Image: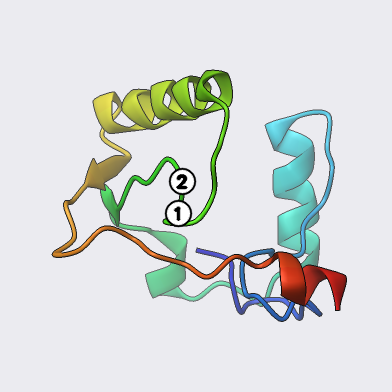
Amino acid sequence: VTNGLLPSLDRTGLAAPGVLARTAADAAAWWRAVSPPATVVDAQPSFPRTAVWSPDLGFAGPDQEPVALARAAVDRLVDAGVVRLVRPPAPPLLLDPAPAWSA
C-alpha cells in the first residue's frame, strides 16, 4: 500500500522506505510525520484488501519454517477480515532481484 508514496532508491520496486520501531504505535507516529496529508478517501481504507499469496514469488527457494510463519500471519489477517486472498490466473513470477541489489 505504501509503495510509491515515499522515494526509494531500490530499483527492484520490492523494498519500501520505512522505519524500525518498537511498537506499531511508534511506526504509526512516524508514518503520520512523513506521509502526505490524508484526504477523506485515504482516511478510510476499504477492507478486506485483495492480496495474492506466494511462498516463493516464482524464483526463491525459501526454508519451510519462515514460509509457515508467514502463511500463518496471512491466515490471521484473512480470519480478521483485513485481507481477502485471490487466486491469480497464473502463479506470481518475479525475476530474482539479487542482481539489481548488488549492482
Q: Residue at x 20, y 63 (%)?
A: 90
Image location of residue 42, percent across then percent down: 45, 69
CA neighbours of label 2 inside 10 A, class few (<14), some (14 to 19), many (20+):
some
Left or right of 98 on screen, residue 49: left
Q: Residue under circle 2? A: 56
Image location of residue 86, percent across then percent down: 18, 51
Left or right of 46 on screen, residue 2: right
Residue 57 - label: 1
Q: Residue at x 41, y 21 (%)?
A: 72
Q: Residue at x 72, y 35 (%)?
A: 25
Front residue of 14/45: it is 14
- The quarter of the picture where residue 17 lies is bottom right
Between the C-alphas of marks 1 and 2, the distance is 4 Å
Residue 91 - label: none
Does the CB distance between marks 1 and 2 fall below 8 Å?
A: yes
- The quarter of the picture where residue 62 lies is top right
Image location of residue 87, percent across then percent down: 16, 52
CA neighbours of label 1 inside 10 A, class few (<14), some (14 to 19), many (20+):
some
Q: Residue at x 36, y 23 (%)?
A: 76
Looking at the rendered structure, the kind of residue marked 2 is Asp
